[in-house]
C-alpha cells in the first residue's frame, strides 16, 4: 500500500472538485497521480493493498450528509442513498416486503461484517473479481495488457468466469446486488461536476467489455453515484432471488438470478429476469423473459424459460457446469414466484 | 537398569479390558488405574489459557514489540524459473527509514555440486531473494518494491503430468539429495535414480518393503478394483503466518518464533550462525497453528538474524498470506493408481499402488503407508514417485501422505465391498483385524445411525442423501528426546518447564493435568512454562508425538519431585516416605490418619528454595517396534459422513460427521473433541473446497489469498460428533497418545463414499465441486 493523502469531502460538489480520475482509468493506465473517492472503501482498498492502485489522494465521501437515507413511497417507489450500508438495506422492513429479491440479494452478499461497512454505491461500482485482473503479475486487457489469461483454452483458469457475452473479457460482474436492482428496473442517479444530476437506467449504467475494455460502468472521472431509485411495485409485483455459491458463509456468486414479475393469478404477465455471474456485466435475459411471459408459472414453463436463457451461452474450457447450474437456478427462482 | 513389575490396565473398557504385566524402571511412578478412577486425567478440563486467547491477551509472535525493533520484509521472485544476473538495490538502500538489506547469495556447500552464480537459481514464484529492515513495515515493503532484479528466464513446468514428460523443462539439473522433513515417502531419495523431474520410486517404509507376489495375488482374486485417484495441492493456511522476531545481542540470540518445534529452530539457528546451542534461545508462548508447515526456521529465520546482525537491532519478520501460500509449504497433490483384489469371501489377495505427486521444488510427495498396513494382505507393493515442478516446496501436512492415500484406498475398499454385495461397514469388520476400530465401528455406527443407509443411488428427488464411511491408521510415534523439569517452590507453587510448545491443541493444559493428578493438586495450582529452549528439550509438534512423548516425562518428573518432598515430611513425622501420599492438597499417612499437612506447609520444610527434578521417559514398557520410537499398535479411527448432493446444481453439503477415535488413555475430553473437530473441518475442506490454483502459462498461484483460496466458514462446517474410545496398553507412565493427525485422515474418503452412496456415481478426484458432480452425472460433457 502506498502513502496517500486523505480528504474528507463535505458535499458532493466538494468531492467532485477534488477527484481527477476513476479506478478504471487508473487501473488501465496507471499514473500514480490519481485522486479517487471511496465510500465504504472495500473495493478501493483491495486494489490499493494489491499495489495495483496507487492513489495520490483519497477523497472520503462516506461522511457527506444526506447520502445515507432510504426513503420509500407507495407511489414514487424507493430511493436509496449511495452511502447506505448493505446492512441497513437488509434490515429495512419496507424493502423486505416490497422488494424481496433485493432484500435476498443483499442478505447473501459478502459477510455480516462486510455488510456493516459496504455501501450500495460502492457495491454496484466495484470492479470484477477475475483472479487475473486482481493479480499484479497478470497484465490483462482490462489493465491495458495484451492478453486475456483466463480465456486461454489450455492454461486459463476460468471456472468462475463468464458464459455469456464473453467475447472481449471473460470476467463476471462482482455485484450480485446489481442483479436484483436491474431486475427491478432500478435507475442510478449520477451527479457531475457541473452540479447536474442525471438518472440512468441500470441496463444502461453498465458497460459491456466489448464497448470499452477499461470500464464496467459509465462513470467518468468527475461523476458520482448519489442514489439508486427503484420504481414502485404494483400489488401484482412478485420477486425472487437465488445465489449459488461454493461457500454459503461468504462467497462470490457462481450463478445468481433475480426475477421480478407482474402476475395475474398464477400467470406471468411480464417478467424481468437478470443473471449475475454469467457475463461481464449483469445480464438481462430477454429470451427467458419472452419465454415465460403470458405463461402459467409452472415447472415446465420455468424450465423452458431457463433453457431459453442459455441458448446463447458459450462456456469456456472449465465452466460448462455453469449452464446446467443456471438452468436449475433460473427455474427455481421463477418457481419461487408461484 | 533396576526394574520392577506392575500390572497395567490393558484393553478397551466395556469391550475387553484386562491386565498386562510390565517390567518398568524403578524410578518411574506406579501404574495409573483407568480414567474413571482418576481425578483430573480424562476429564473435561477447561484449557488453562482459554481466557487469554479469547480476550486477545495472549501474545503471539507477531504481537512481540521490542525496544528499537525494526520491521523486515522479504523480496520474492515473481518468475518461476530463472538465473539472476544482477540485483540492483541502490534505490531501496537510499529510501529514508531503510536500515539494512540482505541478499541471499550462493554459499558453497561441502560435497555438493556448487554453482558459480552469485545468487541461487530461481525455481518458483515466491522464492525468497532478499530482505529489507526498515523503521516500519510500510517502508520495508516500499523498499522491497524498489529492488530491481534482472532475471534470465528459463522454461518452467507447473503441472504434475506435464513435468513427468520426457521433454519437460528440468527443474533440478543436478540430482536432488535433500530429504524433506516430515514427508512421507520412505528413504530411497538419494536422487541417483532421478530421471527428468521424476524421483523414486520409494517402495518401502519402516513397515517393510513389498510383500508376497502380486501376480499370484491377483490370480487368486475373484473381484478386482483398479482405479486412478487424484488429489489437489492443499496449502496449510494456519491463522498465524510463519515468522520470527530475532533479538541478537552480544550474549544470546533470542528468537521469538511461530513454530511447532522450538528445539529444531534453535538447532538450526545455532548451526547456521555457528553458535553454541546455549547461546540461542527460541521462545514460542502461543502458536497460531502450523499443521506441519512450521518445523523449521525457514529462510525467514536466518534472514531476520542476518538483518539483526547488520543493524544491531531486533528484527520483526512475519510473512503475509500470499507468501504463506507460495512458499511455506503445502500438501502435495497425487495421482494414485490402485489395484485391489479379493476373494469371494472378502479376503484381500493383492494391493498394488503406484503414485506420483509433486511437492514443487521439494520432495516428500508420497501417499503414505496406509495401503500397506490398514488391512492385512499377503501380497502388496507400492511405488511412490516424487515429481519436481517449479512451485513452492511441500511440507509435512497433518498425516503426510496418508490423507491422500486414504482417499484412494478407502474408496477402493468400498468398491470391493459393493462388488461382493456386502455392506461397506460389515466388509471392514471382516477384513480389519484392529480391535479398536472394531469398537469404533460399532459405537460410531450406532451414534451415526448407519442402519439408515439406503442402497446406493436409491435416494429420491433432486437433493440426494448419502452415507459413507472411511477408516484410518496412524503409527504411534514417540520422541525419546523429551524432557521436562518440575519445580516445587518453597512455600508453594509448582512449575512445569520444557521447550515443548503448545501448537494450539492444549499441551499446556494436559501437562498441568498430569502434574495435578500426580501431586494431588488442582490444575490451577500448576504454572506451565513451556515453549522455551532454555528449558529441557521436548518434542516437536509433529507425527502426533507430543502427548505420547512429553506426558510420561512430566509425570515422571512430578513423581520424583513428590518423592523428594515426601522424604522431608517423612523425616519430620519420623516415618518412611513410602507410607505417605498427597491427595486434595494434603500430605497424609496411609495408616495414621491423624498425620496431615497441607502441600504448602510441606514445601516449607525444604532447605533450598526449590525442589527441581528433570526427567525423560523410558522406552515403551512393552518394547518398541522400531528402537527409535515406533510403538506397537496404532491410532485407529473410523469416520462416518452424511452428505446432501443437489443433482441439479452439483452442490455437495456435508451435513454430519461422526468421528470415532482412539489415542490410548484420553487425557482431556474437551480438547480431544476440539482437535477432532479441527481435523474433520480440514477434511471437509480438502474434500470440497481448498485447491491451490496455478496458472500453467505464468507459473503464478492465482488464488494466493483467503478470498479465492476457499477454506470453510461456519456454514460449511457439518455437525460433528465424536466417539472417543479409551484403549489401555500399559506402555508408559501415562499410556497416552496424540490425536492430531488421525483426526484428519479419513474424512475426505468418507465424504467421497457418501457422495457415491447418494448419487450412484463415484468421484475419483478432489476437490469435489459442482463442476465435477455435474460431469459425473453427465449433465455437462
Image: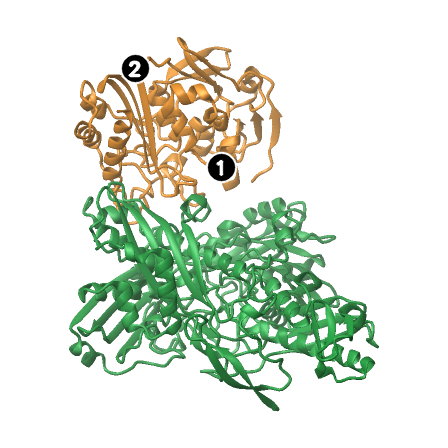
Residue A108's spot in the image, x, y percent? 41, 33
Image height of A335 relative to B500, above or below:
above
Task: Please tell me which of labels 2 and 1 falls first in the chain.
Answer: 1
The subunit carrying tag 2 is A
Which of the image's four quarters has the N terminus of chain B?
bottom right
Looking at the image, residue B157 sits to the left or right of residue B323; the answer is left
Label at residue B280: none
The quadrant holding residue B412 is bottom left
Which residue does the image show at 77% across and 73% down from the upper left? B596
Q: Colour of chain A?
A: orange
| Residue B28 visible from this viewpoint | yes
Query: Does A10 sit left or right of A184 as displayed?
Result: right
Q: Is residue A154 left or right of residue A136?
A: left
Q: Alpha-carbon distance for marks 2 and 1?
A: 43 Å
Q: Nearer the observer, disc 2 or disc 1?
A: 2
Q: In the displayed structure, would residue B612 be above or below residue A123?
A: below
Amino acid at each position: 500500500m502506498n502513502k496517500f493523502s486523505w480528504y474528507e469531502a463535505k458535499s458532493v460538489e466538494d468531492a467532485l472538485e477534488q477527484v481527477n480520475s476513476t479506478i478504471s482509468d487508473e487501473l488501465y493506465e496507471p499514473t500514480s497521480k490519481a485522486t479517487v473517492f471511496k465510500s465504504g472503501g472495500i473495493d478501493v482498498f483491495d486494489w490499493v493493498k494489491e499495489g495495483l492502485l496507487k492513489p495520490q489522494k483519497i477523497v472520503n465521501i462516506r461522511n457527506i450528509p444526506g447520502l445515507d437515507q432510504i426513503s420509500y413511497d407507495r407511489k414514487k417507489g424507493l430511493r436509496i442513498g449511495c452511502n447506505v450500508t448493505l446492512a441497513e438495506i437488509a434490515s429495512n422492513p419496507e424493502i423486505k416486503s416490497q422488494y424481496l429479491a433485493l432484500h435476498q440479494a443483499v442478505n447473501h452478499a459478502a459477510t455480516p461484517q462486510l455488510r456493516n461497512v459496504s455501501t450500495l454505491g460502492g457495491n454496484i461500482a466495484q470492479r470484477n473479481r477475475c483472479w487475473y485482473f486482481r493479480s499484479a503479475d497478470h497484465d490483462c486487457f482490462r489493465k491495458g495488457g495484451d492478453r486475456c489469461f483466463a480465456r486461454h483454452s489450455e492454461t486459463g483458469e476460468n471456472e468462475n468466469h463468464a458464459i455469456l457475452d464473453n467475447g472481449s473479457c471473460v470476467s463476471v460482474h462482482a455485484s450480485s446486488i446489481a442483479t436484483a436492482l436491474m431486475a427491478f428496473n432500478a435507475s442510478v442517479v449520477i451527479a457531475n461536476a457541473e452540479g447536474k444530476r442525471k438518472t440512468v437506467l441500470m441496463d444502461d449504467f453498465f458497460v459491456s467489455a466489448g464497448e470499452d475494455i477499461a470500464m464496467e460502468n459509465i462513470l467518468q472521472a468527475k461523476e458520482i453515484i448519489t442514489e439508486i431509485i427503484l420504481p414502485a411495485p404494483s400489488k401484482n409485483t412478485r420477486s425472487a432471488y437465488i445465489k449459488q455459491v461454493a461457500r454459503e458463509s461468504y462467497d462470490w456468486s457462481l450463478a445468481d438470478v433475480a426475477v421480478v414479475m407482474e402476475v395475474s393469478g398464477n400467470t406471468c404477465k411480464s417478467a424481468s429476469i437478470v443473471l449475475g455471474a454469467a457475463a461481464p456485466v449483469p445480464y438481462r435475459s430477454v429470451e427467458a423473459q419472452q419465454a415465460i411471459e403470458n405463461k402459467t408459472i409452472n415447472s415446465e414453463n420455468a424450465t423452458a424459460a431457463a433453457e431459453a436463457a442459455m441458448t446463447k451461452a458459450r462456456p469456456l474450457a472449465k465452466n460448462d457446469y455453469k449452464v446446467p447450474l443456471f438452468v436449475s437456478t433460473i427455474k427455481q427462482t421463477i418457481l419461487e414466484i408461484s | 537398569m533396576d526394574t520392577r513389575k506392575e500390572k497395567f490396565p490393558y484393553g478397551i473398557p466395556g469391550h475387553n479390558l484386562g491386565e498386562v504385566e510390565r517390567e518398568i524402571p524403578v524410578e518411574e511412578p506406579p501404574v495409573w488405574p483407568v480414567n474413571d478412577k482418576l481425578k483430573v486425567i480424562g476429564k473435561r478440563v477447561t484449557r488453562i489459557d482459554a481466557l487469554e486467547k479469547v480476550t486477545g491477551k495472549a501474545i503471539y509472535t507477531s504481537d512481540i514489540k521490542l525496544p528499537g525493533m525494526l520491521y523486515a520484509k522479504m523480496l520474492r521472485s515473481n518468475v518461476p524459473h530463472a538465473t539472476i544476473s544482477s540485483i540492483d538495490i541502490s534505490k531501496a538502500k537510499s529510501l529514508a527509514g531503510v536500515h539494512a538489506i540482505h541478499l541471499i547469495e550462493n554459499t558453497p556447500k561441502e560435497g555438493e555440486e556448487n554453482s558459480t552464480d552469485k545468487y541461487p537459481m530461481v525455481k518458483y514464484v515466491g522464492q525468497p531473494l532478499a530482505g529489507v529492515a526498515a523503521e516500519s513495515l510500510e517502508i520495508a515493503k516500499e523498499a522491497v518494491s524498489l529492488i530491481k532484479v534482472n532475471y534470465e528466464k528459463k522454461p518452467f513446468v507447473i503441472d504434475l503430468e506435464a513435468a513427468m514428460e520426457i521433454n519437460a523443462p528440468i527443474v533440478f539439473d543436478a540430482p536432488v539429495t535433500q530429504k524433506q522433513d516430515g514427508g512421507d515417502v520412505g528413504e530411497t531419495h538419494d536422487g541417483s535414480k532421478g530421471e527428468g523431474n521424476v524421483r523414486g520410486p520409494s517402495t518401502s517404509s519402516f513397515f517393510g518393503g513389498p510383500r508376497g507376489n502380486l501376480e499370484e495375488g491377483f490370480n487368486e482374486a475373484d473381484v478386482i478394483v483398479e482405479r486412478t485417484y487424484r488429489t489437489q495441492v492443499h496449502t496449510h493456511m494456519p491463522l498465524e503466518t510463519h515468522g520470527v522476531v530475532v533479538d541478537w545481542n552480544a550474549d544470546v540470540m533470542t528468537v521469538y518464533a511461530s513454530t511447532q518445534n522450538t528445539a529444531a529452530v534453535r538447532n538450526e539457528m545455532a548451526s547456521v550462525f555457528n553458535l553454541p546451542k546455549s547461546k540461542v534461545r527460541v521462545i514460542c508462548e502461543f502458536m497460531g497453528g502450523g499443521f506441519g508447515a512450521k518445523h523449521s526456521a525457514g529462510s525467514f529465520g536466518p534472514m531476520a538474524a542476518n538483518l539483526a546482525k547488520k543493524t544491531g537491532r531486533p528484527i520483526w519478520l512475519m510473512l503475509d498470506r500470499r507468501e504463506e501460500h507460495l512458499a511455506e509449504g503445502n500438501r502435495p497433490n497425487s495421482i494414485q493408481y490402485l489395484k485391489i483384489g479379493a476373494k469371494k469371501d472378502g479376503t484381500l489377495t493383492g494391493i498394488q499402488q503406484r503414485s506420483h505427486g509433486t511437492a514443487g521444488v521439494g520432495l516428500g510427495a508420497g501417499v503414505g503407508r496406509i495401503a500397506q498396513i490398514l488391512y492385512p494382505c499377503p501380497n502388496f507393493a507400492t511405488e511412490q514417485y516424487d515429481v519436481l515442478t517449479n512451485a513452492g516446496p511441500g511440507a509435512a501436512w497433518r498425516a503426510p501422505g496418508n490423507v491422500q492415500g486414504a482417499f484412494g484406498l478407502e474408496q477402493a475398499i468400498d468398491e470391493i465391498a459393493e462388488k461382493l454385495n456386502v455392506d461397506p461397514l460389515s466388509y471392514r469388520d471382516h477384513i480389519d483385524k484392529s480391535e479398536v476400530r472394531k469398537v469404533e465401528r460399532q459405537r460410531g455406527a450406532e451414534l451415526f445411525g448407519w442402519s439408515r443407509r439406503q442402497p446406493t443411488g436409491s435416494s429420491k428427488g433432486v437433493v440426494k442423501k448419502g452415507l459413507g464411511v472411511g477408516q484410518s491408521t496412524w503409527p504411534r510415534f514417540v520422541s525419546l528426546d523429551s524432557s521436562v523439569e518440575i519445580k516445587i517452590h518453597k512455600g508453594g507453587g509448582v512449575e512445569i518447564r520444557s521447550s515443548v510448545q503448545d501448537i494450539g491443541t492444549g499441551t499446556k493444559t494436559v501437562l498441568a493435568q498430569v502434574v495435578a493428578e500426580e501431586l494431588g493438586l488442582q490444575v490451577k495450582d500448576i504454572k506451565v512454562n513451556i515453549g522455551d529452549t532454555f528449558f529441557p528439550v521436548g518434542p516437536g509438534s509433529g507425527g502426533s508425538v507430543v502427548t505420547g512423548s512429553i506426558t510420561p516425562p512430566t509425570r515422571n518428573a512430578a513423581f520424583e519431585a513428590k518423592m523428594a518432598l515426601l522424604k522431608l515430611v517423612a523425616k519430620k513425622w519420623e516415618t518412611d516416605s513410602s507410607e505417605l501420599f498427597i491427595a486434595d492438597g494434603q500430605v497424609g499417612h496411609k495408616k495414621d490418619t491423624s498425620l496431615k499437612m497441607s502441600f504448602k506447609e510441606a514445601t516449607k520444610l525444604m532447605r533450598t528454595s526449590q525442589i527441581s527434578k528433570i526427567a525423560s521417559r523410558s522406552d515403551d514398557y512393552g518394547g518398541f517396534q522400531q528402537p527409535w520410537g515406533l510403538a506397537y499398535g496404532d491410532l485407529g479411527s473410523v469416520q462416518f459422513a452424511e452428505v446432501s448432493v443437489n443433482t441439479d446444481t452439483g452442490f455437495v453439503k456435508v451435513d454430519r460427521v461422526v468421528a470415532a477415535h482412539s489415542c490410548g488413555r484420553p487425557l482431556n475430553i474437551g480438547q480431544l473433541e476440539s482437535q477432532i473437530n479441527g481435523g474433520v473441518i480440514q477434511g471437509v475442506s480438502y474434500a470440497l473446497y481448498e485447491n491451490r490454483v496455478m496458472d500453467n502459462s505464468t507459473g503464478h498461484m492465482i488464488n494466493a489469498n483467503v478470498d479465492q483460496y476457499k477454506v470453510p466458514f461456519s456454514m460449511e462446517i457439518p455437525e460433528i460428533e465424536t466417539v472417543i474410545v479409551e484403549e489401555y496398553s500399559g506402555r508408559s507412565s501415562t499410556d497416552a497418545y496424540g490425536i492430531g493427525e488421525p483426526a484428519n485422515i479419513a474424512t475426505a474418503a468418507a465424504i467421497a463414499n457418501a457422495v457415491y452412496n447418494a448419487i450412484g456415481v463415484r468421484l475419483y478426484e478432489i476437490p469435489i465441486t459442482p463442476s465435477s458432480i455435474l460431469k459425473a452425472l453427465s449433465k455437462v460433457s
